Amino acid sequence: MSENSTPTVSKELADFREAREAHQKNVQALREIEAAIARCHQQLKETEEQGQQAKSKWRELFHSLRGEMTEELQAQHTQRVSKRELVKEFDLLIEGLELDRISAQSKCAMTAGPLEITHKAALLSHADEVMNQALREHAVHLIHAFNIKRVAYGVYYSNGKECASSDIINFLSQFSSVYDLSKNNEPIHLEIGAEKPYLDGVDMDLYKSPAKRMKYYTELKARRERYEEMKSKSL
């Protein structure tokens, strides 16, 4: 059906593709930040463990030397302090990344709305066009048969139209249940998808509640200000 799509359907399909691409880019950015956070947490854990080991070794040597500041003791002291400072830097970095993650997640929520809207428009418009084209091209014999039965049954029954309609509905219902769209050259329908799009990267509670979003972003702003203050003091 792609060759026969009307300009309206083509525009709506293009809008859906654009919305889908925009959302996928935001999700990819979110996943990269989440990966960075996970990596930092792992490195923080390793640094904390190394710091504890360095602290124990330094204290043991410090007491064994009875306060004599040898080069080895000074080197271990430097290592102990550097690990402690590195832990602080990781804590600050992780806080900044968490704020970036929240911002990235909010961007996913912003592109989720257009994704849902354009998916619905593209799916329904394409379905309407396929149906209308089939009726235009192949309905002559069906209309002829429908009217024959409608008139004939109308002679003896008051519901001749319903009798004729029921034949069509029953026939379509019987065969549509075993009809596989994936095997019948419907690339546009398969691309759009016959299910609502999965809103990856979206906090659904916030997405569905403007009030929660307002409160959440107010708290986020305050958290960002505290982070910037902490960051400036660490310089």
Image: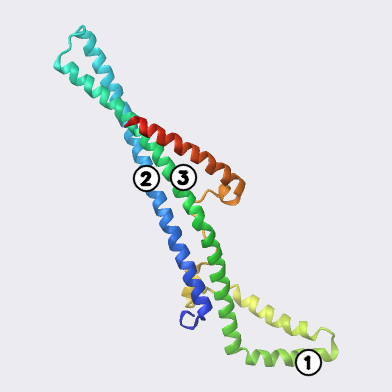
Tell me the distance, in whole angstroms, between the alpha carbons under discs 2 and 1.
69 Å
Label at residue 102: 3
Examine the rendered structure and indicate whether residue 209 appears above or below residue 191: above
Where does label 2 land, which residue? 35
Examine the rendered structure and indicate whether residue 205 appears above or below residue 6: above
How crowded is the residue under tag 1: few (<14 C-alpha within 10 Å), some, or many (20+)? Answer: some
- Per the image, label 1 sits on a secondary structure element best described as helix
Residue 182 visible in the snapshot: no
Residue 49, image x, y percentages: 31, 26
Quadrant holding the C terminus: top left
Q: How is the image coloured?
A: rainbow
Residue at the image position 42 percent from the left and 44 percent from the top: 100
Label at residue 151: 1
Residue 156, image x, y percentages: 85, 89
Q: Is 123 placed left or right of 85 in the picture?
A: right
The amino acid on which the numbered mark 1 sits, given as a three-letter code, is Val
Choose between 107 and 10: the one closer to the eye. Answer: 107
For the residues labelled 3 and 1, say whether their Cβ atoms are less than 8 Å apart. no
For the residues labelled 3 and 2, say whether their Cβ atoms are less than 8 Å apart. no
Tell me the distance, in whole angstroms, between the alpha carbons under discs 3 and 1.
66 Å
